[in-house]
């Protein structure tokens, strides 16, 4: 196979370096040969002629529109065990698919727990040996080139993080992201949920420093549901049929790049090799991190794509005029997504409304809230009540609406206007609405009762809130608990707290601060318009933000990318857990 050296651009024939051990290198680094029929063939870019044409990509996308009914992820059964392994990720919109790191399916199975439950789970690392810390230049710090290839190590080591649970981040079997299991190893977790834990929608993914983006972005993630206790919600909400929508942002080009940069394959670490991303239909695809012709945007455009429960543009059948609860996890390592409904009477489409119930595993102080758009930072969740009905006079048995997304890199387009940061809109899924009114009219029913039901609004409600989620807007904050946190927009990529901070590269830096247990904190955060702020262990309450109907003052988040460039004040109540409380940007490459 012909190999192109890092930084030399496309080449062919005698101009290329040759590695006679290409296949064995791939097998060793990926933990075994690809499964039969999946990812077969050479993995090296043969030159410009190997690029799939725009017509091929268009044909693949058209053929991928299978209109399958949405499938629920499998529910994980006790004793809980997840095995990180080579997993096939279909990418029908570009033809074929890829091998990636996952839990056997994309997404992984859903974990269902109750408040007060002890979550006991085993994480097994079924990957083959990959490059470890010895492959890195540990003296290098990321002060210049974004995601420099000399820094990335341990892509095949893993662990387990419960994103959104209010649990301990410290201890031998707790949600401590500094634990790790490399190839052939396993980790045991016993994570205790408090008795008063807020029910809601969370998710899980690996959180090994250096491999978080590659593993979580490659498909190693799944939903966590903390169940509502009996009679916790009004009957109208409690009795809603519900469905899960794990929206995985699949970015083949970025994952190829992360693979390349994490595989130091020659003496100087300069030859670009991919490890697990093996395309079935176009086996010649390879990403050169500097000069490779495949890009997310531009001439050879392969943009990121949202898939729902691993499916491309699925459909969900709804009953007309009936509320349904949609649990959304935006399982992404980059970008934000704005979701909205398209339908209406004009083309026989369904009229749909969305009522927001909860964000980031926390019910609104007063729910529901009518929203036109759902704004999700990478890692965010939303629980939304959806009701659709067919247009007036629509006589057919079904009508249709579509959920669309606008994927944006930054909320204010503050980084400029180059196509790298362009917005991209696309359909996410469709809703087929069974027209109960037309059906009943055929049976002699005037449809009056159905129309009356469809017009009935959801009643406003408030839930019993645990103390760690009490409304903090009226609290008096002592001066020693008021701080400034800065997520740097440019290089070096780092966070500082009251002016103190350093790059988290290969060593674990000292804590940014020591904060007292039980003392309400107020932080003024700069940079949340560029970097979605994620905080482990304790959620935070927004004190000032540009209200747009979706974001409002008083809302709780654990991950937030703001719609304003102004600094944002947040408050949090560290009520019970001592030890580490990690904070970082949830653009996980950062």
Image (spheres, rainbow, N blue to C red):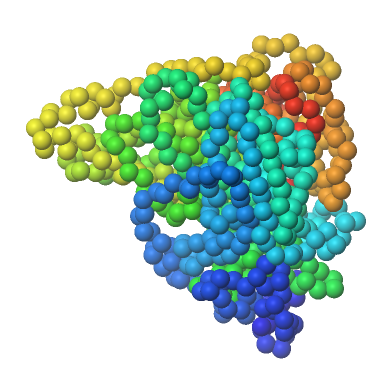
| Above/below status of 356 relative to 468 | below
- For image coordinates 85% across by 71% down, the residue present is 268
Q: Pinpoint residue 273: horizontal percent, then vertical percent.
A: 70, 71
* Position above or below: 551 against 82: above
Outermost residue to the left: 444
In this view of the protein, which residue sits in the foreground, 532 or 117? 117
In the displayed structure image, the side of residue 488 where residue 103 appears, left or right: left
Front residue of this view, candidates 236 and 306:
236
Furthest-bottom residue in this view? 14
Name of the residue lying farthest toward the front: 79
Q: Position of residue 496 (x, y in %)?
A: 82, 35
Does residue 365 lie above or below 75 as drawn? above
Res. 457 image quadrant: top left
**Residue 107, horizontal then vertical, whole percent:** 53, 51
Q: Residue at x 61, y 79 (%)?
A: 42
Estimate the x, y position of residue 113 in percent, counting from the top left.
55, 34
Quadrant of the rendered image containing residue 528: top right
Label count reads: 0
What is the quadrant of residue 263 in the picture? bottom right
- Location of the N terminus (image quadrant): bottom right
Residue 564 visible in the picture: no
Tell me if I can see residue 181 in this picture.
Answer: yes
Residue at position x 42%, y 19% from top? Answer: 234
Residue at 66% in and 60% down? 126
């Amino acid at each position: 196979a012909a190999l192109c050296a890092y930084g030399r651009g496309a080449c062919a024939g005698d101009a290329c370096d040759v590695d006679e051990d290409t296949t064995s290198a791939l097998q060793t680094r990926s933990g075994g040969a690809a499964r039969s029929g999946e990812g077969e063939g050479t993995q090296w870019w043969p030159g410009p002629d190997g690029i799939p044409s725009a017509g091929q990509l268009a044909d693949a996308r058209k053929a991928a529109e299978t209109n399958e009914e949405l499938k629920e992820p499998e529910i994980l059964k006790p004793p809980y065990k997840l095995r990180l392994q080579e997993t096939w990720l279909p990418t029908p919109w570009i033809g074929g698919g890829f091998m990636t790191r996952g839990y056997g399916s994309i997404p992984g199975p859903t974990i269902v727990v109750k408040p007060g439950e002890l979550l006991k789970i085993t994480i097994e690392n079924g990957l083959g040996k990959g490059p470890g810390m010895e492959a890195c230049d540990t003296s290098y710090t990321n002060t210049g080139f974004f995601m420099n290839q000399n820094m990335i190590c341990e892509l095949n080591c893993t662990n387990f993080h419960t994103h959104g649970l209010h649990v301990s981040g410290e201890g031998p079997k707790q949600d401590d992201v500094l634990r790790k299991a490399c190839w052939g190893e396993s980790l045991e977790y016993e994570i205790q949920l408090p008795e008063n834990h807020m029910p809601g929608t969370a998710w899980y993914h690996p959180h090994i420093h250096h491999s978080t983006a590659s593993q979580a972005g490659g498909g190693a993630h799944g939903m966590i549901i903390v169940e509502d206790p009996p009679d916790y919600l009004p009957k109208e909400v409690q009795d809603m049929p519900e469905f899960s929508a794990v929206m995985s942002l699949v970015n083949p080009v970025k994952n190829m790049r992360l693979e390349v940069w994490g595989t130091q394959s020659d003496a100087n670490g300069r030859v670009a090799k991919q490890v697990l991303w093996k395309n079935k239909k176009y086996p010649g695809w390879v990403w050169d991190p500097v000069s490779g012709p495949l890009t997310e945007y531009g001439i050879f455009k392969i943009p990121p794509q949202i898939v729902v429960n691993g499916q491309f543009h699925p459909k969900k059948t709804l009953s007309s005029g009936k509320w349904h609860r949609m649990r959304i996890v935006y399982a992404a390592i980059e970008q934000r997504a704005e979701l909205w409904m398209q339908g209406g009477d004009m083309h026989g489409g369904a009229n749909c409304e969305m009522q927001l119930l909860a964000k980031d595993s926390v019910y609104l102080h007063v729910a529901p809230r009518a929203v036109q758009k759902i704004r999700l930072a990478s890692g965010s969740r939303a629980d939304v009540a959806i009701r659709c009905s067919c247009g007036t006079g629509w006589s057919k048995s079904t009508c249709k609406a579509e959920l669309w997304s606008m994927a944006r890199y930054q909320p204010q387009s503050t980084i400029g206007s180059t196509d790298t940061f362009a917005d991209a809109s696309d359909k996410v899924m469709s809703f087929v609405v069974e027209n109960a009114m037309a059906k009943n009219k055929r049976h002699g029913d005037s449809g009056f009762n159905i129309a009356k039901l469809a017009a009935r609004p959801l009643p406003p409600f408030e839930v019993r809130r645990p103390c760690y989620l009490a409304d903090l807007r009226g609290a008096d904050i002592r001066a020693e608990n008021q701080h400034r946190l800065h997520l740097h927009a440019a290089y070096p990529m780092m966070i500082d707290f009251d002016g103190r901070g350093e790059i988290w590269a290969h060593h674990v830096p000292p804590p940014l601060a020591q904060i007292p247990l039980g003392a309400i904190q107020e932080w003024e955060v700069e940079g949340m318009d560029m970097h979605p702020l994620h905080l482990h262990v304790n959620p935070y309450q927004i004190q000032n933000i540009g209200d747009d109907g979706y974001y409002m003052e008083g809302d709780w988040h654990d991950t937030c990318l703001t719609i304003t460039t102004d600094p944002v004040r947040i408050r949090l109540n560290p009520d019970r857990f001592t030890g580490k409380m990690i904070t970082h940007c949830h653009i996980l490459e950062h």
